[in-house]
């Protein structure tokens, strides 16, 4: 009887673990906090690396491309979140613009288009406070 109970308990735990770790696609978007951390927080964040790579003479294209790729990956993920505070429609609009600029940044970097990279990165930078004032807790 103990063996049956142990086996059933183990099976239940395994099923619970499988459900807890299962991925269901778009619903598993990283939170806005995680995204912003990867893009802007600390010395290893994409924004800081991109800024340094753009300041290099000549521009450090390998680093620019790597940082822009992070923006291209995580920027669009922001649209899959709900706002931590504020109006949902406003957040979706601002997140969509951020995603578009992140994608434009990645595309310009892949073509080594310095002006395109600077333009997209500048637009990303100027959009921060508008969204933070309305939606950051």
Image (cartoon, rainbow, N blue to C red):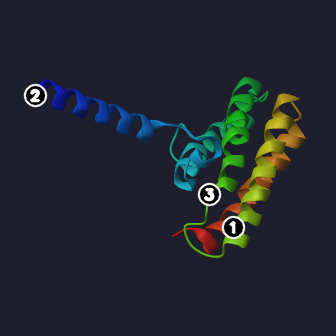
- Toward the left, the furthest residue is 2
Q: Which of 45 and 79 is in front in this view?
A: 79
Q: Look at mark 1 in the image and give the residue it sits on.
A: 91
Q: Which mark is residue 57?
A: none
Pick the quarter of the image with the N terminus.
Answer: top left
Q: Which residue is drawn at 49% across and 37% down?
A: 22
Direction from residue 29 to residue 113 in the image, left or right? right
Direction from residue 14 to residue 87 in the image, left or right? right
- 3 or 2: mark nearer the eye: 2
Q: Is mark 3 on a helix, strand or loop?
A: loop
| Picture layout, residue 74 above or below residue 130 | above
Q: Residue 2 carries which label?
A: 2
Q: Look at mark 3 in the image and give the residue it sits on.
A: 81
Q: How crowded is mark 1: few (under 14 residues within 10 Å), some or many (20 or more)?
A: many
Q: Which of 90 and 40 is in front in this view?
A: 90
Q: How crowded is mark 2: few (under 14 residues within 10 Å), some or many (20 or more)?
A: few
Residue 56 in view? no
Q: Mark 2 or mark 1, which has the lower sequence index?
A: 2
Percent position (x, y) of residue 134?
63, 74
Percent position (x, y) of residue 21?
44, 37
For the residues labelled 1 and 3, say whether their Cβ atoms are less than 8 Å apart. Answer: yes
Q: Could you give the CA–CA distance between mark 3 and mark 2, rounded to whole angstroms? A: 46 Å
């Amino acid at each position: 009887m103990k063996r049956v109970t142990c086996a059933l308990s183990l099976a239940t735990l395994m099923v619970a673990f499988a459900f807890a770790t299962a991925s269901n696609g778009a619903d598993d978007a990283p939170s806005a906090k995680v995204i912003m951390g990867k893009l802007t927080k600390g010395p290893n964040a994409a924004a800081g690396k991109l800024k340094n790579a753009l300041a290099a003479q000549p521009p450090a294209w390998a680093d620019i491309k790597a940082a822009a790729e992070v923006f291209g990956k995580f920027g669009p993920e922001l649209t899959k979140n709900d706002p931590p505070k504020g109006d949902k429609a406003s957040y979706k609009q601002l997140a969509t613009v951020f995603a578009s600029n992140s994608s434009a940044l990645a595309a310009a970097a892949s073509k080594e288009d310095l002006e395109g990279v600077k333009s997209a990165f500048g637009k990303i930078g100027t959009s921060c406070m508008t969204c933070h004032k309305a939606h950051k807790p």
